[in-house]
Amino acid sequence: MKRRVLIVDDDAMLCDALAVAVRQMGYEPDMAGSLQEGLTKARAEDYDVVVLDVLLPDGSGLDNLSKFQACASAPEVIILTGACDADGAELAIRSGAWGYIAKPPTLSKIRLPIQRAIEHHQGRQKVLPLGLKRSGIIGDSRAVQTCLDLVAQAAASMAATLITGDTGTGKELFARAIHDNSARASAPFVVVDCAALPDKLVESELFGYERGAFTGADRRFEGLIRQAHNGTLFLDEIGELPLAVQKAFLRVLQDGRFRPVGGAKEVASDFRLVVATNRDLDALVAAGAFRQDLLFRVRSMTVTLPRLAERAGDIALLCRHFVARQSRLRGAPEKRISPDYMEAMELYSWPGNVREMIHAVEHSLAAGMNDPVLVPAHLPTNIRVSLARSALPTHARQGGTLAAANAELLPLRQVRLQAVCQVESRYLKELLSATAGDMGKACALSGLSRPRLYALLKKHRVD
């Protein structure tokens, strides 16, 4: 079967030139002059690669990248970007694009990215095993499938893997999935919560200690690194690891050996490393709070987990799963879910991600103890308040009245989206004003990663 490439660009001459190059490579080109035409073709037919322009008459290719990736053939996407747009190139890669081609493209610049993308697309279809153990991961969205592809790749190698994502996105579940699908699945999976370890005990917990090594050491302790021998060591919130311990841990990664506190001999440990963080490690390196050489060692592979709000279609699936699971744990009949309850779950922004949803379901089941059906009134108060406020037009939230506005009511989903956009846009402008446009300070103050901040600035057209 001939491999197919879809070119989405409103420049007819450029489309023709790219099509000639694609045909010369032995592939079959197809063209679309607008975003909507491109999406229609990508959804109706199978393509291995989509070459997508950023600026299109009816929208941004970058903003709609995930829609092309979500098509049935799951094509690789190559972004066409301006030659001087370094931020656009970075954002394309961070957003999941296979690569980018700078305009104006030359034949040599076109051939290799397309060839490599097609080879990757063919190989990716073979990498993800049908029997991949999900280890509790729920979701069928394109965003989750992309992460599962990376889990399969990481599990098949010994490369150190960094899992990033907001709090509550399920970083430990994905770390366990990497372990469960690896050759070390039968060996220990040792979890270390770096944020929960007291500074004075980090070294002794990781490396272990001999009896009498310090006050209170009345027995020998093997240490978590040694406990992970032949298995997987998962360091959660590695950004909280003290600098002094980072240096010692780097030596463990280099030599596979370490000395327990108070010990006379070195101990060996052969482990596979998976780490996770919700912080921007590059910003921590710039601030001198994280070692750059350690970052290089732990970031051989990266899995970036999506926020729950970005997992299209997964909210209803997760909601039903958690209701059923919590009902079983309570030993109670499974409650039905009303349509308006599910609508409320899908409208809420879930700043706490999956973890917050679990708590919301637990609260709902407790609040609706004697009711056979879950309704919005059973949700936690903060969620109901948030939904109520976002349902009102802006002037009403600022103290006006609906009667005074004499305006036609919009659909709830549209009003909510408008409200979120207005709040985000205002916050970004105030953030840049407070930091005088210093992106490093803006990331540190907002808690956003640099790619996420750039994406929001682009989305709201904030200069």
Image (cartoon, helix red, strand yellow):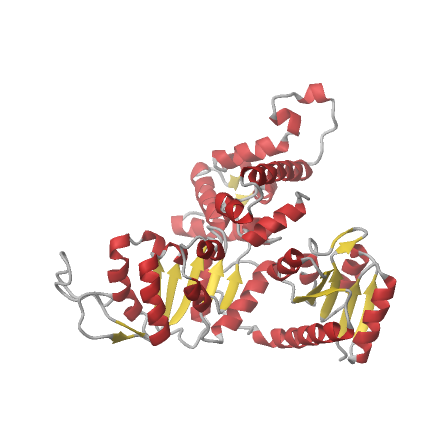
Taking 433 as reference, is 278 left or right?
left
In front: 401, or 92?
92
- Where is residue 421? Give x, y as percent: 64, 39
Quarter holding residue 392: top right
Taking 23 as reference, is 54 left or right?
left
Quarter holding residue 252: bottom left
Q: Is residue 311 visible?
A: yes
Vertically, is 412 above or below 170?
A: above
- Where is residue 116? Give x, y as percent: 67, 75
In front: 111, or 236?
111
Vertically, is 224 above or below 165?
A: below
Q: Residue at x 51, y 46 (%)?
A: 441
Vertically, is 132 above or below 52?
A: below
- Where is residue 307? Give x, y as percent: 54, 51
Q: Is residue 170 visible?
A: no
- Where is residue 3? Give x, y as percent: 75, 76
Q: Residue at x 51, y 64 (%)?
A: 302
Taking 270 as reference, is 333 left or right?
right
